[in-house]
Every structure is written in structure tokens, then in C-alpha cells.
Image (tube, rainbow, N blue to C red):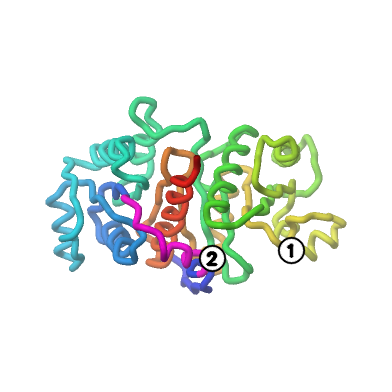
Amino acid sequence: MSQQTGTGKYEQMLTKCKNLKPVPTAVVHPCEESALSGAIEAANLGLIFPILIGPRDKIEATAKSTGIDISKHQIVDTPHSHASATKAVELVREAQAALLMKGSLHTDELMSAVVSREGGLRTARRISHVFVMDVPTYHKVLFVTDGAINIAPTLEDKADICQNAIDLIIALGLKKPKVAILSAVETVTSKMPATIDAAALCKMAERGQITGAILDGPLAFDNAISKRAAETKGIRSLVAGDPDILLAPDLEAGNILAKQLSFLANADSAGLVLGARVPIILTSRADSVRSRIASCGVAMLAAHARRKKP
């Protein structure tokens, strides 16, 4: 993983967590040190109330070998990772947990339980992923979507991906976030379908099919991030130079963009899955402690905002 700098943007965002109660969180198969320590660190900071789901002997052995105190926390004993994912989803459906947190199992294994048509956590909204990034060279937290779940999203998929990210930012307390819909160029052309999708998404926002944000696109990355670059090209935009959300044209572009920011710009990267019944915290063994805590904090704020909705 790249050297992490930590510019304080996460910490400013997470100050809102201080007066909130910890959220019951189903931690799925935390049978490795990084998975278990991330959950316990978040618990010690008052962000989550972890329910550890997995083989009891493996969880206890991991805790003992790494010196992690889990004596205060409930363990739900399951035989293997697949059963852990199924049980975690069941606890959410029974309202015993309001968040899911990935442990030491494959993302695909967890998500298959989440999207199961029988007993899963689907909603009418498309499920999507968002990277929550603290980029040292940018003036605020940047949300990049979708670089992990939707490989080649349709226009309708992109509308849901966009709305998921907007709803998350609004849950964090920001009104009218700005969305830059990325392409390689800023002009609309039938030769590049992503530009047509971008133009359609902007019109959908005008018609109320996407709400709560200011959208602009297509925008090339330089025009999205740099007001000067946009002005040089004669682009008048409320979004250019100040986006909160970067909406990628497909998974490959979003994934490459997020990892470039991590490895070339020393950005910290937290991650959430949105669009299911509850937010899902996706952590990686390569994540810094700071990134894991940020993922839990953002999910906590999203969960509390969801409770307030009528």
C-alpha cells in the first residue's frame, strides 16, 4: 500500500460521530488479525457495536495470538465463511444489526449472500460501491464511484449509482453535493457512449429523476478537477474545480482512478457498498488503520441518517 499522509479531512468529517450511539454491526468472519482489529478499533472509538460472526475457535485463536481483547463482544458461532455471510444477513433482516462489515472472506462470498433473491438485502436501488478518499492535493473529501461492483453499468444503473453516492454525502451533512460525470472528453458524441450517458444523467437530474445534487457532464478529468482547465476550454460549470463525487463511466475507469490516487497521490481510501438495506463496510488487509476507521465512521453516519428518514 502507498505511504499514507492523512491530511485531516477524514477527522473533520468524523467529528459528527462523537455524539452518536455506536451502531450494532454484523462483522462477517473476522478470522484474521486485520479483520478483527479493524472491528475492535472501531468499537473502542464508539463507532460500532460489533457482533462477531464466524467459527468461535478461529476468532478466539486470532484474538489470543494478536493480543486483541474481545471479552466484551458477542460471538455468533458458524462453521465456515459462507455460513457467516448468511447468518450476518439474517441478523440484519431481523433488525439485530444495522451495518455489515466484511471480515476475512472474499467480497464475492459476502455479496452473494447480500444479493440473494431469497433472504438477501436487495432493495429497488442498484447496489454500488463508493471510494471515500482523502487526497492530499484536493481541498475536500472526494467520493469515487463505482470502481468495485458494476462492471459496465447501463444509464439506469448509473442513475442509481449516482443517487447512492448523493444520499451518502447528504447523510454526512453536506447539502447539494456536486457530481462530475467523467468521460475522456467534454463534448457529447455518439462515438463515445459514456458522453451520451453523462448528458442524459444531467437531464434526468433536471427532471427530478436524480435528486439532491448538482450534476455536470460529460467532463474530462482535468476539467472536472481544475476550474482553470475548464475555463481554458470555455466550459462554464458549477461543478468544475469543486466536485464532491466523481462518477466513472465504468468499473475499470473508477478502479484505476481510485488506485492511482492512492498510489501516486498518497490518498487514503475508505470504502462502502450502498443500495442494500444497510450500508456495507468493505475493508482490505492493505487498508491503513485510518482508512478502516473512516469506513466505519462514514457507515455509522449513514446508518443514523437512515434511521431518521420517515
Q: In terms of image quadrants, where is residue 62?
A: bottom left
Badge 1: few (under 14), some or many (20 or more) residues near its Cα, within 10 Å?
some
Q: CA distance from mark 2 to mark 1?
A: 17 Å
Instruction: Tell whether 46 sits left or right of 183.
Output: left
Q: Relative to residue 131, is residue 151 depicted above or below?
A: above
In the rendered image, the residue lying farthest to the right is 234
Q: Residue furthest front?
A: 310
Tell me the kind of residue under disc 2: Asp
Q: In terms of depth relative to the viewer, which is nearer, 234 or 306?
A: 306
Q: Position of residue 14 (x, y in %)?
A: 47, 64
Label 2 sits on residue:
134
Q: Residues within 10 Å of mark 2 (few under 14, many from 20)?
A: many
Quadrant hosting residue 43:
bottom left
Magenta stretch? Answer: 12-24
Q: Nearer the viewer, residue 62 or 206?
A: 206
Q: Is residue 191 above or below residue 21?
A: above
From the image, tell me which residue sits under label 1.
226
User: Residue 77 placed where, x, y %?
Assistant: 16, 44
Residue at horizontal 14 percent and vertical 56 percent from the top: 60
Image spot of residue 287 (x, y percent): 40, 62
- Residue 69, magenta (yes or no): no
Q: Residue at x 63, y 54 (%)?
A: 175
